[in-house]
């Protein structure tokens, strides 16, 4: 489909080819392999002289449809889909990095990504250097002759900080580096890093892309020549997305825009309420004027997303007490669901992380992360208000 169509139309009308049954809704292609007419077709297909599905670890009609939609949404040349967001992150890293390489990354990254940097990349003699979200002026000082790319999430998880994509892109171009951006919190509906110079964009499709907490998935999209290498790496290592999950996610993308609009509306109302509460020390939400990078967020994001970070007075115990008092909202490690989810990173996901690393990621003892859902916002506010009391 022509990519001059509007976002919502592309999300709904980009579909895999109709079968002989003329179905309106795309069927599930639950098959491990595909059949060839003869030896020559099989040879030509495996030699990539003929483009077609060979084996579902490489590609599948349902997965192809999902990837095509994300590419159109992000303005990307190509993409590859994975079993989870972290499979996308690791496979992208594994493709791009060789022994002896170096990565510059924002210190405020998802806990599992931090684990890759600190525990596993060093095993293969790959170095990393972190910059603080508030010290972007220091990025160029961290670049070495063996630096391969700059990596960042924006907004960040879980601190909800915002990084200037144009600034990062300018630094990469100056030093001949790739720019790799995790766009999970914003989704392609709210932000398009490729338009700001990113070479590759990664998503955990598990989050707002699915939007209902049902399936895992990940995707990396970007420049064709880079995706080709990621495809070859993944074809051998096997982290590919299942046909069923791709089918679910493709249907989910049809409602991404309308869902995200409501998520953002609810989140802004909740953030505004929290900002005026006496039991709350600070609130971070990109479209609040008090957010440190509010102007950057307005420049590169359509709306503020559905994630709020705020600090409850009372430190670790204050955060735990707050969670125990929640009645309606869910206590879960996921985000981007129709249901509002509340987490306390200091006592759960980041409990074992070193104090200085937590501080660099903006995680304080009383910090709470809220993934604002699609319930009536008054009910969400009422639940958090009674928990704060």
Image: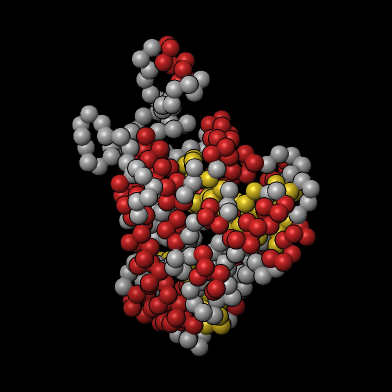
| Residue 91 in picture, x, y percent from top left | 58, 41
**Nearer to me, 128 or 370:** 128
Residue 148 horizontal side relative to residue 210, left or right: right
Which quarter of the figure is the C terminus placed in? bottom left
Q: Residue at x 44, y 32 (%)?
A: 59
Identity of the residue furthest to the bottom in this view: 278
**Nearer to me, 384 or 25:** 25
User: Residue 156 lies in what quarter of the image?
Assistant: bottom right
Which quarter of the figure is the N terminus placed in? top left
Q: Is residue 124 above or below residue 346?
A: above
Residue 185 horizontal side relative to residue 247, left or right: right
**Nearer to me, 313 or 3:** 3
| Residue 171 in picture, x, y percent from top left | 68, 57
Q: Is residue 84 visible?
A: no
Q: For the image shown, how many numbered marks are present on the structure?
A: 0
Q: Is residue 136 above or below residue 179?
A: below
| Residue 32 in picture, x, y percent from top left | 40, 28
Q: Is residue 36 above or below residue 261?
A: above
User: Residue 375 lies in what quarter of the image?
Assistant: bottom left
Q: Is residue 163 visible?
A: yes
Q: How is colour applied across the structure in the image? A: secondary structure
Identity of the residue furthest to the top in this view: 39
User: Residue 358 lies in what quarter of the image?
Assistant: bottom right
């Amino acid at each position: 489909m022509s990519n001059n169509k509007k976002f919502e139309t592309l999300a709904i009308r980009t579909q895999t080819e109709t079968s002989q049954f003329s179905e309106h809704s795309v069927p599930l292609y639950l098959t491990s392999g595909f059949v060839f007419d003869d030896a020559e077709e099989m040879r030509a297909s495996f030699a990539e002289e003929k483009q077609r599905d060979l084996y579902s670890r490489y590609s599948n009609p349902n997965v192809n449809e999902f990837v095509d939609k994300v590419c159109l949404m992000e303005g990307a040349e190509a993409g590859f889909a994975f079993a989870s967001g972290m499979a996308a992150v690791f496979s992208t890293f594994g493709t791009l990095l060789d022994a002896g390489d170096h990565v510059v990354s924002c210190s405020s990254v998802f806990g599992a990504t931090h684990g890759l940097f600190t525990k596993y990349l060093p095993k293969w003699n790959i170095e990393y250097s972190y910059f603080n979200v508030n010290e972007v002026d220091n990025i160029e000082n961290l670049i070495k002759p063996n630096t391969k790319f700059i990596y960042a999430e924006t907004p960040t998880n879980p601190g909800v900080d915002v990084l200037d994509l144009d600034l990062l892109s300018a630094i990469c171009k100056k030093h001949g580096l790739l720019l790799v951006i995790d766009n999970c919190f914003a989704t392609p509906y709210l932000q398009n890093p490729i338009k700001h110079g990113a070479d590759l964009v990664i998503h955990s499709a598990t989050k707002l892309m699915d939007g209902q907490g049902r399936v895992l998935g990940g995707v990396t999209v970007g420049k064709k020549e880079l995706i080709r290498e990621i495809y070859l790496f993944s074809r051998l290592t096997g982290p590919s997305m299942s046909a069923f999950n791709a089918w679910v996610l493709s249907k989910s993308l049809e409602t991404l825009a309308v869902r995200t609009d409501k998520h953002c509306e609810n989140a802004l109302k909740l953030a505004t309420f929290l900002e005026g509460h006496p039991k709350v020390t600070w609130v971070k939400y990109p479209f609040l004027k008090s957010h440190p990078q509010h102007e950057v967020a307005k420049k590169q994001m359509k709306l503020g997303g559905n994630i709020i970070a705020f600090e409850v007075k009372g430190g670790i115990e204050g955060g735990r007490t707050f969670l125990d008092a929640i009645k309606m909202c869910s206590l879960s490690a996921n985000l981007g669901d129709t249901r509002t989810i509340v987490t306390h990173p200091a006592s759960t996901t980041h409990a074992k992380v070193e104090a200085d690393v937590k501080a660099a990621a903006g995680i304080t003892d009383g910090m709470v992360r809220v993934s604002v859902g699609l319930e009536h916002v008054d009910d969400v506010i009422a639940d958090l208000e009674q928990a704060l009391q």
